[in-house]
Structures are given as C-alpha cells and as structure tokens.
Amino acid sequence: MNGPKVIFTLPIDIPPFGQVKITETVVNSWIVMAFLVLLSIFLTHNMKKVPKGKQCLVEKGYLMLQNLVKNTMGEDKLGFVPYIGTLMMFSAVGSLSSMTGLRPLTADLNTTLGWALVTFMLVQVNNIRRHGVGGWLKSFVQPVPFLLPSNIISEVANPISMSFRHFGNIASGLVVTNLVYTGLAALTSIITGGWATVPFLQLGIPAVLSVYFDLLASCLQAFIFCMLTMVFVSMAMDD
Amino acid sequence: MDEYMGFVSIDWTLIFTWGNLLILYLLLRHFLFKPVQKMLADRENEVKSMYDNAEKAQTEAEQMKAEYTEHLQNAKAEANELLQSANQKATLRSEEMLREAQQKASDMVTRADAQIEEEKKRAFQEVKREISQLAVMAASQVVEKEISEKDHERMIEEFIDGAGDAKWQE
C-alpha cells in the first residue's frame, strides 16, 4: 500500500527537509477547499430576512453547530464556532471525497497531525491567555509536583492520539476498500477462468462496505475530532 | 514511474495542511459564517425591536387609559360639587325670600295697625269736638245765660278728656 502520490515537485530544496513535494493530499485539499468555498458562496448568496429553501438549510445547520459549541464549550466561547465549523466541514468532506475516487485528505497523517497540532496550540495559547504564563506552568505540577512528567506526557499525547485516531480510521478504510477491490478482481478471473475482462464482481459489493468505511467513519471521525478540540480548548480556558 | 510518499510519513504536506486550514478558515468565515451570523443577528434585532415597540405602545395605551379614567372621575366629582353648591344656593335663596316675605307681611300689618290707631284717634277727636259743640249749644239754650262759648267748650273738653281717657280706652 502506497502513500499519497507526488503530483509535482517544486524546485526548492531546503537542506534538512529535502525538496518541496506537492502530493495528492495537498491537491485534493485544494479541490475540497474550492468545493467548500463555492458551496458557501452559493448557500449565502441572496439571503433574505424571511428565509426560503437553501437559506433555511444553512441557517439550521449553523444553529446546530452553534448549539453544539455552546453546549460543549459554554456560552462565552461562541467565537470558536467558525473554526470548529471549518474543521468539521474540512474533515468530513475531505474524508467523504474518497467516494468520488479521490484519495481522502485524512488518509494522510500530515493532515490529521497538522490539525491536531493546531488544537494543541489553541489549548496552550488559550491556557496562557486565561491563566498567565505562571498559571500555565503551574498547571503542569497540579495536583502534586511529582505528576509533572505524567502531565507533560498526557498533554503531548493528545495531538498524537487525536491525529492517529482520525488518520487510522480513514486510512484503514482506504486499505480495506483497496483490498476488497483487488480481491474481487482476482475472484472474478478465478470464477470465469480468466475469461472476463471486466471485473464485474467489483460492482455493488464494495458499496455495502463503503457505507461504513466512507460514510459513517468520515462523519464520525470529523465529529470526534471537533468534539475533542472543543473539550480540550474549553478545559484549558475554564477553572 | 509515479513517485509515492510513505504511507505513514511526516513531510512538507504538514506545512501545506496548516496553510490550507488557515486559508479555508478565513474564506469560510468570510463567505459562510459572517453572512449567516449577520443575518441571524439582524433578524433577532428586528424581532426584538418589534417586541419593544409593541410593549411601548401597550404601556402608552395603558397610561392613556389611566389618564382618561382619572379625568372622567374628576369631571364626575366636579359635576357633583356643582350640583351640590347650586342646591345649597337655591335653598339659601328660597329661605331668604321666605324671610323677606314674612318681614314684608309683618311690616304691612304693623303699618295697618298704626293707621287704624291714627284713624281711631282722629275719629275720637271729631266726636269729642262735636259733642262739645252740642253741649255748649244745649247749655246755652237751657241756662239762657250769656256765657263765653269758648270757655264752655274748654271746660267740657276737659271734662270729657278726663272721663273719655278712661272710658274710650281699648
């Protein structure tokens, strides 16, 4: 099983990291981003005081998101709604893009680790903003000083566990789907004795698996990732 | 031959992920979240202002109603007062008129009494004079004595006065 394909390489070489390679993941991200931005422009185009059609949908969706943030983080942290919404849509649509034949963005550890590190930074920055540098440092020796190593590990473990959970779910779906396709192709040629040129068994059967690996896992992982982000950030800002 | 990255690797894509996330965040905030937030806030404000206006109108109406009720009550009280004072005045006036009439009547009676007294006196004088004349005439006939008519008359008048005062008293 390969990683993402390199689409093109920029003629830039930064010594310890090597050449800048633009992979399938990055290009697919741009496609997903363009889709989301165009969808947003379409949905918010020509909005009226009395909502109709698509405007009801987008307002309902926004209010659901706002309620989720309000219930998880609290009334005073509604400023996070745009970021959480962006993350959720990027993750969900990025994972669901596998259904169009694109390699999902989230099947690349770089994507999920990048997002998880943003969450990590949000947690630390907001902790410092809320409690000051002293309070932030003190939170690592709470409740007793000898827990310092364990506190640091648990803080660093968060982005790692978040990113690997998301990456693992989507990537494993990709792997299983690939295996199923390959297996069905082999099965077709065995059954027909190499006679069939079209692996017709690939039709239909993978769709059933796709309901779980693509639809369910994509939405679930996007939701879990956003929930964890909200919980960690609000925990850092509270108490 | 296509070049592939490792299945689990950390590379330049990480940097692009951050850039892409930031760009998408800014774009979606501008194209999706801000417009929807603005729309919802506008609607909320409008509804709120409508409610405020309705409440204000109701308060005003209630105030006006209270004012009118008060005015009405004042007017009623004023009318009552007017009626009472008119009544009082009328009573006073009628009493005065009655008193005046009584006064007038009693005055008239007094005046009439005085007149009667006067008439009586005058009549008495008249009678006295005639009687004295008669008496002089009779005396001159009987006595046939030349006597001053004037002296006689005076004497008789004195006599009658002395007797008449007691006899003709009422």
Image (cartoon, coloured by chain):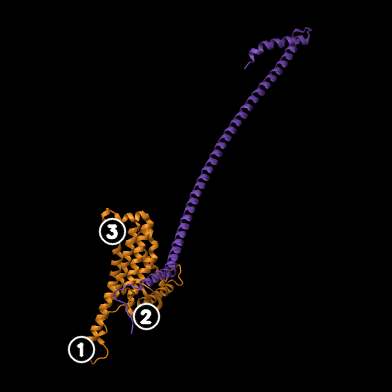
Query: Residue A190, which numbered label?
Result: 1
- Label 3 resides on the chain identified as A
Q: From this view, report whether residue B120 is shown above or below residue A80.
A: above
Say yes or no: labels 3 and 2 on the same chain: yes
Task: Identify the secondary structure beneath mark 2.
Answer: strand
Q: Colour of chain B?
A: purple
- Res. A216 visible in picture: no
The residue shown at (34%, 56%) is A136
Query: Residue A111, which numbered label?
Result: none
Q: Which residue is mark 2?
A: A7
- The residues tagged by marks 1 and 3 sit, at their Cα atoms, a distance apart of 56 Å
Task: Identify the secondary structure beneath mark 3.
Answer: helix
Disc 2 marks which amino acid? Ile
Q: From this view, report whether residue A81 is shown above or below residue A43.
A: above
Q: Which comes sooner in the sequence, label 1 or label 3?
A: 3
How crowded pointer 3 is (Cα within 10 Å; few <14, some 14-19, many 20+) is rated as some
- Label 2 resides on the chain identified as A
- Residue A57 drawn at (x, y percent): 38, 70
- In this view, the residue in front, A48 or B98, is A48
- In this view, the residue in front, A229 or A76, is A229
Q: Which comes sooner in the sequence, label 2 or label 1?
A: 2
Q: Which comes sooner in the sequence, label 3 or label 2?
A: 2
Q: Which residue is mark 3?
A: A151
Disc 1 marks which amino acid? Ile
How crowded pointer 1 is (Cα within 10 Å; few <14, some 14-19, many 20+) is rated as few
- Label 1 resides on the chain identified as A
- The residues tagged by marks 2 and 1 sit, at their Cα atoms, a distance apart of 35 Å
In-image side of B126 versus A234 (left or right): right
